[in-house]
Image (cartoon, rainbow, N blue to C red):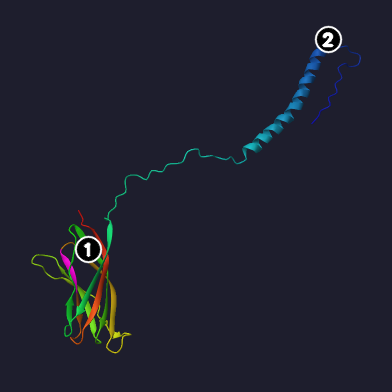
Amino acid sequence: MSFLVIANLKGPGKRLNSRSSALAVAALVIAVATLSIHPALHAQAHANAATNNQPTNVNVVNSPTVTLGGPITVLEPSRQPLVIHSYVQFPAGSDTISSDQYNIPAGKRLVLEQFSIHCNLDTPVYVDTYIQAGTASPPDYPAFFAPNVMSWPADGGSSSYRAVGTTPIHWMQDSQWIQFVVNKSNKLGGGQCVVTAAGYLTALPQ
């Protein structure tokens, strides 16, 4: 932006002395300078305002640290997975057979969660099985019964039958032993069964 200033320093019929002329010139220079600087300052202020409105990047110098509080307490001891397989065989003319005993390790709790049986038999019979346990001295024998299973013809011919069953359970015991007992619905024929119990061992509560 430019300004044109025209001043008549000498009026008609009058004469200005040198001091008056100097003051007039100085005033004129100040006026011109003020008019010239004001638009520049206004433009600069506008530019600064526009710059300040722009988004600013923020850099995180150090990695932030999050404190969760005190130590975490694990309420349940570690588990040791366990699978117990027992093989039993029916002699001809028998209807009940027991497996070997499983001794629970000292200082451990036995927890069983799954129970299954698979039998190959000579005759079509019902089969049931249960867990038997010794827990005291003299021992008593608490028992958990699994569902009955019905045999059906297998691929081995007319004298070959299969009985299979499985069920979820919750058996917990802290000492002594357990064993599996398998029953047939009659004493005809023989056969063999595999009984499987799955669960875990854990430390006894303190």
What is the quadrant of residue 195 in the picture? bottom left
Specify the quadrant of the image occupied by residue 204. bottom left
Q: Are marks 2 and 1 in contact (CB under 8 Å)?
A: no
91 horizontally vs 65: left or right: left
- Most foreground residue, 60 or 86: 86
Asked whether, in this view, residue 101 is left or right of residue 55, the answer is left
Chief secondary structure of the magenta portion: strand
In the rendered image, which residue does mark 2 sit on? 18
What residue is rendered at 29% in x and 79% in y?
Answer: 164
Give the quadrant of residue 162. bottom left
Image quarter of the N terminus: top right
Question: Label 2 amino acid?
Answer: Ser
- Mark 2 lies on a secondary structure that is helix
Toward the left, the furthest residue is 138
Q: Position of residue 145 (x, y in %)?
A: 21, 75
Which residue is at 80% across, 20% downward? 28
Badge 1, how many Cα within 10 Å: few under 14, some, many 20+?
A: many
Camera-near label (2 vs 1) is 1
Residue 93 vs 180, above or below: the answer is below
Outermost residue, right side:
13
Q: Is residue 184 magenta?
A: no
Label 2, label 1: how many angstroms apart (C-alpha)? 120 Å
Rendering coords of residue 75 (x, y %):
27, 54
Residue 33 locus on image (x, y percent): 76, 23
Residue 149 or residue 58, whichever sits in front: 149
Q: Which residues are magenta?
A: 176-180
Per the image, the residue denoted by label 1 is 110
Q: Of callouts 2 and 1, which one flags the residue occurring earlier in the amino acid sequence?
A: 2
Instruction: Specify few, some or many for label 2: CA neighbours under 10 Å numbering under 14, 14-19, or 20 or more.
Output: few
Name above or below for residue 71 compared with residue 24. below
